């Protein structure tokens, strides 16, 4: 009897093929247009919703898939289609994961479905952690949440930045500090329900890549949310704060970090989708482009580049699948394997897309071919969800136990 397999089962293969069809037929043909428009591709999100690809049920099914590879397979296929549209379709899941990781069953049941809306009336959600002075250093968050006991409400003030879907979201999840002296241990996550006064969109960013995905500042000016919008509930927060004040370890899980931990391999899988797409374009091109009387792939110099690209893509996928398998089997991430997978996949996407541009020569530099867009899109994968340097920091600390800074 074999106890080890890297073969996705029939369920995973069926999902992969279904999503690949959607990515090839709907996403890829629309990619250049939405990249130029720099707008959220609502019609495509709607189409995905009608097919059940943009829905809580679909992501929950993949999230709880016992093989662990449901989410990575889904992400890779959608982002193979296009990363900007892929993020427009999947950006909501970052907020949904925050609720799944930190919320009570009741909060999950109330808010997660609202984040997606319905196929007739699709909605998106936003996870707002980063701030102008708190990017990699999440402990420096200044957005403040103060409890108003008389009204059982939280009052939130601050400015968030870089929020995917920020300001256009139906539901925003906001990370704020309730006790600044405790750093990241004094933070909590809050739901800001639709239409709450005081929340507004600030600047919408014009970006280098993933331009179909909306990224903006979110301003919170005297935002009041009911007590039940504190994810996890007040009792749990008070107990956690008391432990932090006593300096006791354990249970002091940082709200933003918990979300990032759960989502890193999935983000790595997105990067793999981009890399695979660029590799395939480059491989086809190298087989058909003739110079010096032969296809350029017959030069070792070109063929070896493609060999390295494919090897790195497969290695990155193995790291992502391992981390996802570990997560579903509750294996401890003793060497920060989730961070490893995101680090390697992100760096691979940048490497592979740059090589693909080189193989396409002048054509690679134009918008007639998709690889320059893929290269622009890949650049975010060494930045968001923790930069490559921060992933290395996390891995280095995990493997050494040393207080590396
Ligand atoms: C398109 C886009 C979408 C995003 N979506 C979201 C979102 O939905 N929600 C959200 O909350 N945030 C989001 N972010 C924010 C993203 O997570 C941050 O940009 C990222 O964490 C880096 O923070 P920063 O930009 O402030 O860079 P900084 O933290 O200022 O880093 C600048 C440079 O310094 C390096 N550096 C910093 N500290 C160290 C150190 N200790 N050791 C070595 N090097 C270091 C970094 O690696 C980086 O190279 C998004 C960002 C972008 C660009």
Image (tube, rainbow, N blue to C red):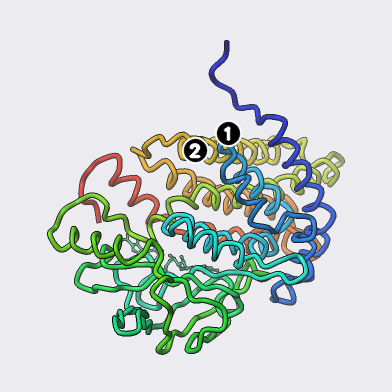
Vertically, is 83 above or below 290? Answer: below
Residue for point 60% across, 49% down: 60
Left or right of residue 18: residue 395 = left
Quadrant housing residue 286: top right
Q: Which mark is residue 328?
A: 2
Depth check, front residue: 206 or 212: 212
Badge 1 crowding class, 10 Å Cα cut-off, few under 14, some 14 to 19, many 20 or more, is many
SS of the residue at dot 2?
Answer: helix
In the image, farthest residue toward the front: 150
Residue for point 70% across, 76% down: 39
| Residue 358 on image: x %, y % | 68, 53
Left or right of residue 276: residue 336 = left
Residue with the mark numbered 1: 67
Residue for point 30% across, 43% down: 398
The reply to whether residue 32 is in sight is no
Depth check, front residue: 85 or 51: 51
Vertically, is 329 above or below 219? Answer: above
In the image, farthest residue toward the top: 1
**Quadrant of the image containing the C terminus:** bottom left
């Amino acid at each position: 009897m074999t106890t080890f397999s890297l073969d996705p089962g029939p369920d995973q293969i069926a999902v992969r093929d279904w999503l690949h069809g959607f990515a090839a037929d709907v996403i890829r043909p629309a990619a250049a247009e939405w990249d130029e428009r720099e707008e959220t591709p609502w019609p495509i999100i709607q189409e995905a919703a009608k097919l059940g690809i943009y829905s809580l049920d679909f992501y929950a099914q993949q999230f709880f898939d016992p093989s662990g590879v449901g989410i990575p397979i889904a992400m890779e296929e959608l982002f193979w289609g296009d990363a900007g549209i892929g993020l427009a379709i999947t950006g909501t899941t970052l907020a949904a994961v925050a609720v799944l990781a930190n919320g009570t069953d009741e909060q999950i049941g109330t808010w997660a479905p609202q984040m997606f809306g319905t196929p007739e009336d699709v909605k998106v959600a936003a996870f707002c952690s980063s701030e102008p002075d708190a990017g990699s250093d999440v402990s420096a968050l200044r957005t403040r949440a103060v409890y108003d006991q008389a009204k059982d409400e939280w009052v939130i003030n601050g400015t968030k930045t870089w929020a995917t879907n920020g300001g256009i979201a139906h539901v925003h999840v906001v990370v704020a500090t309730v006790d600044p002296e405790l750093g990241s241990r004094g933070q909590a996550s809050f739901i800001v329900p639709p239409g709450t006064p005081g929340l507004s969109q600030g600047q919408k960013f014009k970006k280098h890549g993933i331009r179909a995905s909306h990224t903006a500042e979110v301003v919170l000016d005297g935002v009041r949310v009911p007590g039940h919008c504190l994810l996890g509930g007040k009792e749990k927060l008070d107990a956690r704060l008391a432990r932090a004040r006593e300096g006791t370890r354990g249970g002091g899980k940082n709200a933003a970090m918990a979300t990032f931990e759960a989502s890193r391999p999935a983000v790595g899988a997105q990067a793999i989708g981009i890399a695979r797409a660029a590799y395939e374009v480059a491989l086809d091109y190298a087989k058909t482009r003739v110079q010096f009387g032969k296809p350029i792939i017959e030069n070792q110099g070109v063929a070896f580049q493609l060999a390295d690209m494919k090897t790195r893509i497969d290695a990155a996928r193995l790291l992502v699948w391992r981390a996802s398998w570990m997560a579903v089997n509750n294996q401890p991430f003793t060497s920060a394997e989730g961070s490893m997978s995101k680090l390697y996949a992100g760096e691979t996407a940048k490497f592979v897309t740059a090589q693909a541009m080189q193989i396409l020569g002048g054509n690679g530099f134009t918008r007639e071919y998709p690889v320059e867009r893929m290269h622009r899109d890949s650049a975010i994968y060494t930045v968001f969800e923790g930069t490559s340097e921060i992933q290395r920091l996390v891995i280095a600390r995990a493997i050494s136990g040393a207080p590396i800074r």
